[in-house]
C-alpha cells in the first residue's frame, strides 16, 4: 500500500456567522425581561456605557409606530463585522471604523446629547464612581425581597418532628419523607427505600417502614399526604372527613365504597355499571360524586406556592377610535436609554492617555455601540412585524379567536423583505397586550384551511368553533366525534374525525362518554 501527500487549491464560498452576529440574533429573540437583565449586566461590566436621562414616552412610541411604514422603505443600518479585529467587534456599516479616531459624539449615543456627569478616572481600574449620597438599588431590592419559602419536604419534616411516635418510627418516617415527590406522593416502593438507607444508619425493615408510613398518613397535614397512589390519597381524605364529622355519613360511605372498589368505573364515568354492582341509585352516586369534589388528588401542593412566572407584554395593541384602526406600540419604556459616556469618549481620543488605556476604552465603546445598535435593531424589527400582524388580524381583535386568519411567517417575511428566520426570532417568547387579553405573538402565525364559502380560516379559529359546538351540546347526550364533524360541516368547516379528536385533546376536552352527565 502506498501513501502520498499532495497540496490542492480549492476555490469556494462559505458563510460563517460572526460571534457578534449570533449575539445580535440572541438580542432579537430575547423577551423584554431577559433584555432588561442583559442590559443591566452590560451596564455593570462596561464602564463606557451609561443611562441617559429621560426615556421614550408613549407619544414617542406611537409616533414611531406611525412612521414604521415610511422607515421600512428607507435603508436600514445593519450591523456589520470589523474584519480587522477578527469579527470581535460589531460595528455599524456606515464608516464607524473610519470615524473611530475622532469618535464623534453623535456616533456614541442613541439619545440627545446631555451634559455627562463628571466622573473620577483611574487608568488602572476604570470603575464607575458612585456618590456617597446615592442608594444602591440592587441592595434595596435584595433587602425588600421575601425570604425563600420552605420546601415541601422541609415543612413535612418539621411536622413529623412534632409527632408523638417512637424513635424507631421517627427515623423511618424521616427516611420515607426523603423520597416524597413534589405532589406529596411516595411512589418509591418501601423495599427500595429500605435498601437506600444512609450509610452508617440501621437499615429499617419493611414492616417498620409500613408502620411509619401509616403514622405519616394519619398525622401529616393536609390529609392525603404521603399516599402511594390516587386511590389511597382519596381514601385518606375520606377517613379524615369521617373523623372530623365534616360530611354526611351516608355520602361518605358511598364515596368511600366507590373509591375503594370502583375507581376504574369512576374514571371512565360508568355510573350505571357502578349502580348495578353496588345497588346505589344514580342519585346516591351523584351525592357521593358531589362530596368527592371537595377532595384533592394532590393535597400537598397547598403547602408550596407555585405562582406562575409573570408575563410582561412586549407590545400593547389599542383601538384608535378616531382612525378606526388598531395601533401597536412597544412596551419598552422600562428599558434604560443608553449612550456612551462623553468623558470616556474624549479620553479615547486623548493622546496623553496611555495607549493601553485608550485601547481598553475603544474596545468597551465598540461593545457599547454594538449593544445600542442591536437593541435599536430589535426594536425596529419587532415593531414592523407586529404592525403586519395587527393589520392582518384585524378581525381577531374585533370578534375574537373565531375570526383569526391564517398567517404564515413566510408571508410576513416576504412583505417586510426579511428572512423568515428573523420573523421567527422576533416573535419567539413575545406577548401582546390586546383588547382580547394577553396573547402570545406566535399565536397569530398559524396555518389554516378554506371553508365551503372560499374564506380562509385558521386552525385556531377551527378549534374555537369546535369548542362552541361542544359547549352547546346536550350533556345528557354528548356529541360523538363523528357528530361533531357533521356539526362543523354545517358551519362550512370540513375536517376529518381524527382531526376533531386531535383538537379535542389539545383543548383538554374529554371524549363523549366522559362528558356525559346522568
Image (cartoon, rainbow, N blue to C red):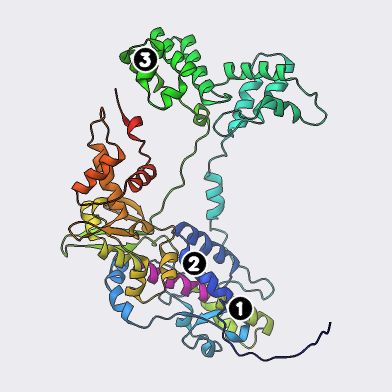
In this figure, which residue is indicated by the disc labeled 1?
88
Residue 27 — which label?
Answer: 2
Residue nearer the viewer, 22 or 453: 453
Residue 254 visible in the current orientation:
yes
* Image-quadrant location for residue 171: top right
Q: Which residues are magenta?
A: 370-384
Q: Position of residue 176 (x, y in %)?
A: 67, 26
- Label 2 to label 3: alpha-carbon separation: 62 Å
The mark nearer the N terminus, 1 or 2, is 2
Choose the circle earlier in sequence order: 1 or 3.
1
Q: Position of residue 435 (x, y in %)?
A: 26, 52
Q: Secondary structure at mark 2?
A: helix
Disc 1 vs disc 3: which is toward the camera?
Answer: 3
Answer whether labels 2 and 3 touch (C-beta < 8 Å).
Answer: no
Residue located at (66% from left, 13% from top): 164
Q: How many marks?
A: 3
Residue shown at the point (71%, 17%) measured from the top left = 208
Badge 1 vs badge 3, beta-carbon distance below 8 Å: no
Amino acid at each position: 500500500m502506498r501513501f502520498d501527500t499532495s497540496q490542492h487549491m480549492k476555490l469556494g464560498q462559505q458563510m460563517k456567522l460572526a460571534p457578534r452576529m449570533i449575539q445580535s440574533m440572541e438580542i432579537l429573540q430575547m423577551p423584554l425581561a431577559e433584555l432588561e437583565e442583559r442590559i443591566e449586566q452590560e451596564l455593570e461590566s462596561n464602564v463606557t456605557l451609561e443611562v441617559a436621562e429621560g426615556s421614550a414616552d408613549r407619544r414617542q412610541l406611537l409616533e414611531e409606530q406611525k412612521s414604521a411604514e415610511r422607515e421600512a422603505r428607507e435603508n436600514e443600518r445593519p450591523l456589520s463585522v470589523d474584519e480587522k479585529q477578527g469579527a470581535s467587534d460589531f460595528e455599524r456599516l456606515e464608516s464607524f471604523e473610519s470615524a473611530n479616531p475622532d469618535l464623534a459624539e453623535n456616533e456614541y449615543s442613541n439619545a440627545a446629547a446631555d451634559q455627562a456627569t463628571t466622573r473620577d478616572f483611574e487608568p488602572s481600574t476604570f470603575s464607575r464612581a458612585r456618590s456617597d449620597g446615592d442608594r444602591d438599588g440592587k441592595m434595596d431590592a435584595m433587602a425588600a425581597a421575601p425570604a425563600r419559602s420552605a420546601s415541601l419536604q422541609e415543612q413535612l419534616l418539621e411536622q413529623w418532628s412534632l409527632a408523638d411516635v417512637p424513635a424507631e418510627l421517627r427515623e423511618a418516617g424521616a427516611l420515607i419523607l426523603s423520597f416524597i415527590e413534589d405532589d406529596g406522593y411516595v411512589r418509591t416502593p418501601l423495599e427500595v427505600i429500605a435498601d437506600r438507607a444512609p450509610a452508617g444508619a440501621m437499615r429499617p425493615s419493611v414492616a417498620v417502614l409500613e408502620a411509619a408510613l401509616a403514622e405519616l398518613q394519619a398525622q401529616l397535614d393536609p390529609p392525603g399526604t404521603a399516599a402511594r397512589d390516587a386511590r389511597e390519597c382519596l381514601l385518606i381524605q375520606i377517613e379524615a372527613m369521617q373523623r372530623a364529622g365534616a360530611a354526611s355519613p351516608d355520602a361518605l360511605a358511598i364515596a368511600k365504597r366507590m373509591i375503594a372498589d370502583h375507581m376504574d368505573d369512576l374514571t371512565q364515568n360508568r355510573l350505571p355499571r357502578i349502580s348495578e354492582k353496588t345497588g346505589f341509585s344514580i342519585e346516591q352516586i351523584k351525592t357521593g360524586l358531589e362530596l368527592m369534589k371537595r377532595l384533592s388528588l394532590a393535597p400537598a401542593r397547598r403547602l408550596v406556592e407555585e405562582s406562575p412566572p409573570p408575563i410582561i407584554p412586549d407590545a400593547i395593541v389599542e383601538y384608535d377610535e378616531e382612525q378606526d384602526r388598531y395601533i401597536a406600540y412597544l412596551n419598552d419604556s422600562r428599558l434604560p436609554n443608553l449612550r456612551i459616556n462623553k468623558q470616556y469618549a474624549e479620553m479615547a481620543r486623548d493622546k496623553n492617555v496611555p495607549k493601553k488605556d485608550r485601547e481598553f476604552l475603544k474596545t468597551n465603546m465598540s461593545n457599547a455601540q454594538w449593544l445600542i445598535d442591536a437593541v435599536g435593531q430589535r426594536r425596529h424589527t419587532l415593531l414592523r412585524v407586529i404592525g403586519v400582524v395587527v393589520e392582518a388580524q384585524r378581525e381577531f381583535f374585533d370578534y375574537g379567536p373565531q375570526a383569526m386568519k391564517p398567517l404564515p411567517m413566510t408571508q410576513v417575511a416576504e412583505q417586510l423583505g426579511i428572512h423568515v428566520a428573523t420573523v421567527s426570532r422576533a416573535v419567539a417568547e413575545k406577548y401582546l397586550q390586546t383588547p382580547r387579553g394577553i396573547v402570545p405573538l406566535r399565536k397569530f402565525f398559524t396555518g389554516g384551511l378554506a371553508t365551503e364559502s372560499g374564506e380562509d380560516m385558521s386552525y385556531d379559529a377551527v378549534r374555537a368553533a369546535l369548542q362552541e359546538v361542544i359547549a352547546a351540546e346536550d350533556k345528557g347526550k354528548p356529541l360523538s366525534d363523528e357528530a361533531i364533524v357533521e356539526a362543523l360541516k354545517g358551519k362550512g368547516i370540513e375536517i376529518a374525525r381524527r382531526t376533531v379528536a386531535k383538537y379535542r385533546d389539545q383543548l383538554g376536552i374529554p371524549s363523549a362518554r366522559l362528558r356525559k352527565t346522568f
